[in-house]
Image: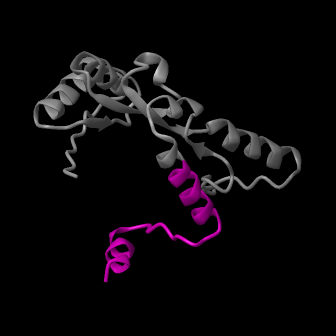
């Protein structure tokens, strides 16, 4: 796999997202994964126009291009809001701290619509990997040093 990366320096500029994605597709990209609000909406439009694939973010974005959005990296902000309000109501809220939510808290995930364009064997592999991550059979590196140590 060849990875291309470019920052849009915006969360709202759909035209810029579309232009960046078009450039990536013209440079051989098959899939663009964009994380940038409406910049991503423009990138998904480029995927549709180029008959290529995109990966959405934050919510299931398959409705924007059902034949082109392979999946979406869902961030369930509602889980964090719920837990924060719950801790406040219970009197255990600690201001000024950082809390990270992930797979164990069901705060991230893959939408059901992924099955529309992704094969069942890949979906099964994803579920197997999620289980291994939750069971601590796989440890995700938190920085470049940990990442490099994984491959020594």
143 and 126: which is toward the camera: 126
Q: Position of residue 91 (x, y in %)?
A: 87, 52
Q: Is residue 14 left or right of residue 137?
A: left
Quadrant in which the C terminus is drawn: bottom left
The residue depicted at 69 percent of the width and 41 percent of the height is 79
Q: Position of residue 25 (x, y in %)?
A: 17, 31
Q: Position of residue 110 (x, y in %)?
A: 55, 40
Q: Which residues are magenta?
A: 124-152
The residue depicted at 24 percent of the width and 18 percent of the height is 15
Q: Is residue 55 above or below residue 104?
A: above
The residue depicted at 60 percent of the width and 55 percent of the height is 100
Residue 134 lies within the magenta run:
yes
Colour basis: one colour
Q: Is residue 34 left or right of residue 103?
A: left
Q: Main secondary structure of the magenta part?
A: helix
The residue depicted at 67 percent of the width and 48 percent of the height is 106
Q: Is residue 98 above or below residue 56?
A: below
């Amino acid at each position: 796999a060849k990875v291309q990366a470019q920052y849009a320096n915006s969360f709202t500029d759909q035209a810029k997202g579309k232009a960046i994605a078009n450039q990536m597709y013209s440079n051989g990209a098959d899939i663009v994964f964009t994380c940038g609000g409406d910049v991503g909406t423009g990138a998904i439009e480029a995927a549709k126009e180029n008959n290529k694939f995109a990966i959405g973010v934050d919510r299931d974005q398959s409705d924007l291009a059902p034949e082109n959005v392979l999946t979406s990296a869902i961030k369930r902000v509602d889980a964090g809001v719920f837990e924060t309000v719950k801790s406040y109501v219970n009197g255990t809220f600690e201001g000024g701290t950082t809390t990270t939510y992930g797979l164990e808290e069901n705060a991230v995930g893959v939408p059901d619509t992924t099955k529309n364009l992704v094969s069942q064997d890949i979906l099964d592999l994803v579920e197997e990997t999620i289980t291994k991550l939750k069971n601590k059979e796989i440890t995700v590196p938190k920085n470049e040093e940990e990442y490099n140590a994984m491959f020594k």
